[in-house]
Structures are given as C-alpha cells and as structure tokens.
Image: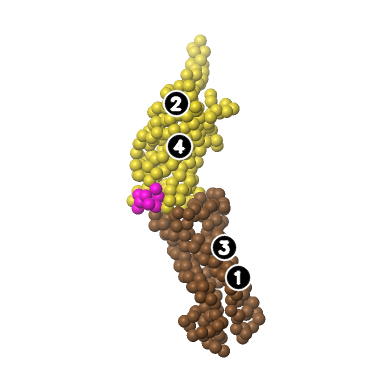
Chain colours: A brown, B yellow
C-alpha cells in the first residue's frame, strides 16, 4: 500500500466532482442549443441543480484539502513545474466556484430564481436586469470554456506524468493504477 | 348667422360631455404584471403597452364603464428567447390576436376602498368571465387602482401542444394590475 497518496475521501470527492463537472459541461452545451420547449426548461433546471451540487462538493473538497495536505510532488519535478501544478490547481478551484456562481447570478438577472431540487429556493443576489443577464450569460460561457480547457490541460499533465515521467502523480489519485516507483 | 351656427356646432363637438367623466390611465404610473410558475419557480413578466378608458365614480361603482386593451406583443419576460416564443402561435399567437381585452360588466363596492370587478376577458379568441378584487387609493388628484386575479392559461389555449404540460409551466397565471388615473 503506497503511502504517497490522497486520502480515500479526497479521491472519492475528486472523481465524483470530475464526473459531475464533465457531465454538466456537456449537458449545458447541449441544452443551450435546444429550441425553447418544456424539455429545455426541465433540463436547465436540472443543470442548475447539478451546478449547486458541484458547488457544495467543491466547497467540501476545499475544506478537506485545507485540513488534509496533498501528498508531496515527486522530487524529480523541476521547481517551475511544481509551481505551475500548484497555480493550476488554484485556478481550477477558482473556476469550479465561479462556474456555478456565474450561472446562479445569470439566472437571477434573467428573472429565474434557482430552486435547488425544485424545493429549496436560493435567494437572488441580483434582481432582474436584461443587460446584466446578457453579460453574465457571456461570462458563464467563457468561465466554463476556460474550465473545460484547464481540465483538459490537467488531465493531459496527469497522463504525461504517468506515461512520460513514469512517476506516481496519477496513481496517487487513481488507486487501482499501479504506481511507477522511481 | 349660419356661420355662427356652424361654429357653435363645431365647438359643441369639441367640448367633452360633462356626464361621462372618462379617465385615461397614466402609462408610466401603471403596470400589468403576471407571474407564471415554471418548474415550480415563480417567474414574473409584464406588458409594456396597454390602454384603458375608465369612467368610474367610487360613490356609484355600479355605473362603472371600463375597457382595457393590452398590446400582447409588448410582452417583457426579461429575455428575448422567451419573448419570441411567447409571441408565437402556440402561446399568444399575436399575428392573429395582437390584443387582449377586458371589459368590465359590473363593479361592486366591498367597503373601505375595496371593490370587485366582474367582466369579460378576451385573449387569443377566447372570452372568459373573470372576477378581480381591487383597492382604490386617492391622493393628489390621482386615483390608484390595484388588484389581482388568477387566470388559467389553458382555458385561453395559451401554451398549446407540448407547452400544455402543466408540470413545466403551471396552468394558473397570477395577473397583477396597477392603474393610476386622474380623479377628474
């Protein structure tokens, strides 16, 4: 049992959030292009509920991360690589929070309150405002494009660590993968 | 002589009749809003353009004459996609039915500034009888009429085909109105 690995909780949260984010990203892109219909209204409600769920899980992840330090990066990494990894993880968290937040603000400005699971109304911070809604829609889209792009970089880097560097960076988040021991 | 007759006849036509004290609503102090429930979430909209001709005397509500006309194309839902859809055939079909119309058939006093109007509401070629309670507040030569009623959109075929599904958009639509008119 390798020691240099994330806690079970951190691993579970990572993959759960990863699955929800990737699904909701695709689901949002699909739904936005549907012609207006009851189906579209339903899907957007679900999209928002998943977004709220992601927000809560990411907050839980961040708390866990702050109280349970991540395992050390391999000593074979150059200082700039370690710094880049650290900065990109911070950027991912910023995007994970700003994606649902911008969606919630956009929804409020568009005059459609977010009611979690159809039962728990989340207060509107903004009141209805068409110009603001248009701006927030663009912001929500770009935040998510940026998040999608950074997730791709994150995943590519993890694979590169495993295949090229042959270190344990991917294995410490993927327990069934056999870690390469340098 | 005939010239004077002509002139006085013309003047008589121009003069308002004192018996029918008609009042026009002041648009920027009046509003017609509505609340629909979409996925159980109340969503508010309004109509920007409407017109009303009212002849109302709080002392004699039974003699009220009131007619309201709403330009349905002026719908404001806060987003263009929803408005385009609302104007289409399945919803308001404004190409064929550009206006909604309410004609009060009777108004009765309920006491302390409270009244109840009964009348015919025509939307999208369907006329339904509605009862709308309202209050009246008078101040500074202005009379503010405020009230609300609930209509069932499907009775007017507002939202046909897949939109008739009331689990996504509820049947009940709450209509809130506020009209400010000069007292004289």
Find out whether residue B166 is within the magenta segment: yes
Q: Chain of mark 3?
A: A
Dot 1 falls on which chain?
A: A
Query: Callout 4: 10 Å neighbours few (<14), some, many (20+)?
Result: some
Q: Residue at x 52, y 13 (%)?
A: B4
> Which label sits on residue B148?
4
Coordinates of residue A20 in the picture (x, y in percent): 47, 67
Please state which of the two labelled residues, at mark 2 or mark 1, is closer to the viewer. Answer: 1
Q: Percent from the top left, x then y, of residue A26?
A: 46, 66
Q: Which chain contains the residue that carries disc 2? A: B
Q: Nearer the viewer, mark 3 or mark 2?
A: 2
| Numbered badge on residue B109 | 2
Q: Residue A36 got which mark?
A: none
| Residue A58 image offset from top left, x and y in percent | 54, 66
Q: Which span of residues is magenta-colored?
A: B162-170
Near mark 1 (Cα within 10 A), the count class, few <14, some 14-19 or many ≥20, is few
Q: Furthest residue to the right?
A: A79
Q: Which residue is mark 1?
A: A66
- The residue that disc 3 covers is A98
């Amino acid at each position: 049992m390798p020691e240099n690995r994330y806690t079970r909780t951190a691993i579970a949260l990572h993959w759960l959030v990863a699955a929800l984010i990737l699904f909701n990203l695709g689901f949002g892109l699909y739904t936005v292009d549907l012609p207006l219909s009851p189906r579209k209204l339903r899907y957007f409600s679900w999209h928002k509920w998943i977004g709220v769920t992601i927000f809560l899980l990411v907050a839980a992840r961040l708390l866990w991360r702050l109280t349970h330090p991540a395992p050390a990066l391999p000593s074979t990494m150059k200082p700039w690589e370690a710094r880049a990894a650290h900065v990109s993880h911070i950027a991912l968290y910023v995007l994970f929070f700003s994606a649902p937040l911008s969606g919630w603000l956009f929804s409020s400005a568009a005059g459609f309150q977010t009611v979690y699971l159809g039962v728990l109304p989340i207060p509107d911070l903004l009141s209805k405002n068409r110009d603001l809604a248009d701006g927030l829609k663009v912001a929500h889209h770009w935040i998510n494009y940026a998040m999608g792009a950074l997730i791709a970089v994150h995943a590519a880097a993890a694979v590169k660590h495993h295949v090229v560097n042959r270190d344990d960076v991917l294995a410490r988040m993927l327990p069934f993968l056999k870690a390469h021991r340098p | 002589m005939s010239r004077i007759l002509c002139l006085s006849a013309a003047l008589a036509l121009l003069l308002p009749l004192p018996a029918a004290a008609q009042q026009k609503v002041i648009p920027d102090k009046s509003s017609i809003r509505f609340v629909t429930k979409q996925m159980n979430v109340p969503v508010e909209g309004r109509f920007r353009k409407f017109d009303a001709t009212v002849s109302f005397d709080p002392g004699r509500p039974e003699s009220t004459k009131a007619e309201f006309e709403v330009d349905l194309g002026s719908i404001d839902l806060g987003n263009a996609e929803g408005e385009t859809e609302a104007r289409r055939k399945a919803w308001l079909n404004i190409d064929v039915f550009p206006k909604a119309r309410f004609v009060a058939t009777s108004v009765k006093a309920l006491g302390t500034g409270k009244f109840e109007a009964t009348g015919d509401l025509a939307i999208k070629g369907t006329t339904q009888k509605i009862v709308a309670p309202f209050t009246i507040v008078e101040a500074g030569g202005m009379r503010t009429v405020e009230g609300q009623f609930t209509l069932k959109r499907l009775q007017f075929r507002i939202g046909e085909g897949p939109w008739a599904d009331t689990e996504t958009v509820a049947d009940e639509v709450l209509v809130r109105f506020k009209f400010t008119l000069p007292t004289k």
